[in-house]
């Protein structure tokens, strides 16, 4: 499936990697941001509170980036995920928001090597940029990476597994 390029107004930002545009829930492809506290959830566990803290930081960073552009975003639609959300790459001008979030230490990439066909140079460049961004953020201890060695912070996929009792 070839990506479909669409410029739209952002209606709502759900969290650091999900937003609503054109009445569709749109999920950022190839990154994962920390989880935010959902309605009714409570905890005193430091690993949970820390996840929610960084989830809110990620969401606010995305809000700030998009508001700087009058809530306009360009999306390259790439399919749908397990939950029916539109998978897409997000841009403001030439700036890719997945890379910006990752470079700030507010997202971690998950790159499905071998499970994806690269349709064009834009996708190949995005993939390479995410690898570079996460290495810079980690090396310079940006965002949540400064707490990564501390047991109180789990990467988003680790947090999800622990929350479900899988680790």
Image (cartoon, grey):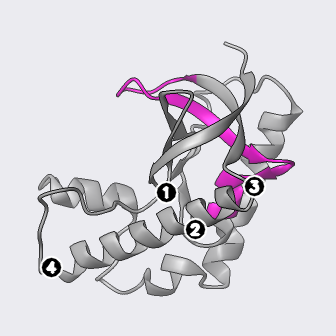
Nearer the observer: mark 4 or 2; the answer is 2
98 inside magenta stretch? yes
- Circle 4 sits in a helix, a strand or a loop, which is it? loop
Res 154 → quadrant: bottom left
The mark lying in front, picked from 4 and 3, is 3
Is 47 left, or right, of 9 in this rendering?
A: left
- Neighbour tally class for label 2: few under 14, some 14-19, many 20 plus, Cα within 10 Å: some
Give the left or right position of residue 163, taking residue 84 as reference. left
The residue at 32%/60% (across/down) is 158
The mark that comes first in sequence, 3 or 1, is 1
Q: Position of residue 29 (x, y in %)?
A: 58, 39
- Judge depth for marks 2 and 3 and give the one in front: 3
Residue 146: tell me if it is visible: yes
Q: Which residue is mark 1?
A: 16
For residue 40, above or below residue 50:
above
**Measured Cα–Cα span from mark 4 to mark 3:** 37 Å
Q: Which residue is mark 4?
A: 45
Q: Residues at badges 1 and 4 in contact (C-beta under 8 Å)?
A: no
Q: Which residue is mark 3?
A: 69
Is disc 3 placed on a helix, strand or loop?
A: loop
């Amino acid at each position: 499936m070839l990506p479909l390029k669409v410029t739209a107004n952002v209606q709502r930002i759900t969290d650091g990697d999900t937003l609503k545009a054109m009445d569709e829930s749109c999920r950022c492809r190839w990154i994962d941001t920390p989880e935010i506290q959902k309605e009714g959830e409570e905890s005193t566990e430091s690993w949970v509170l820390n996840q929610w803290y960084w989830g809110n930081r990620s969401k606010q960073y995305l809000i700030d980036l998009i508001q700087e552009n009058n809530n306009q975003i360009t999306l390259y639609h790439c399919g749908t995920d397990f939950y029916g959300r539109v998978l897409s790459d997000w841009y403001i001008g030439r700036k890719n928001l997945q890379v910006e979030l990752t470079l700030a230490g507010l997202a971690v990439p998950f790159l499905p090597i071998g499970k994806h066909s690269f349709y064009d140079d834009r996708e190949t460049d995005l993939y390479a940029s995410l690898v570079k961004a996460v290495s810079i953020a980690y090396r310079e201890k940006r965002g949540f990476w400064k707490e990564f060695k501390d047991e109180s912070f789990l990467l988003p996929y680790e947090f999800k597994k622990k929350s479900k009792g899988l680790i």
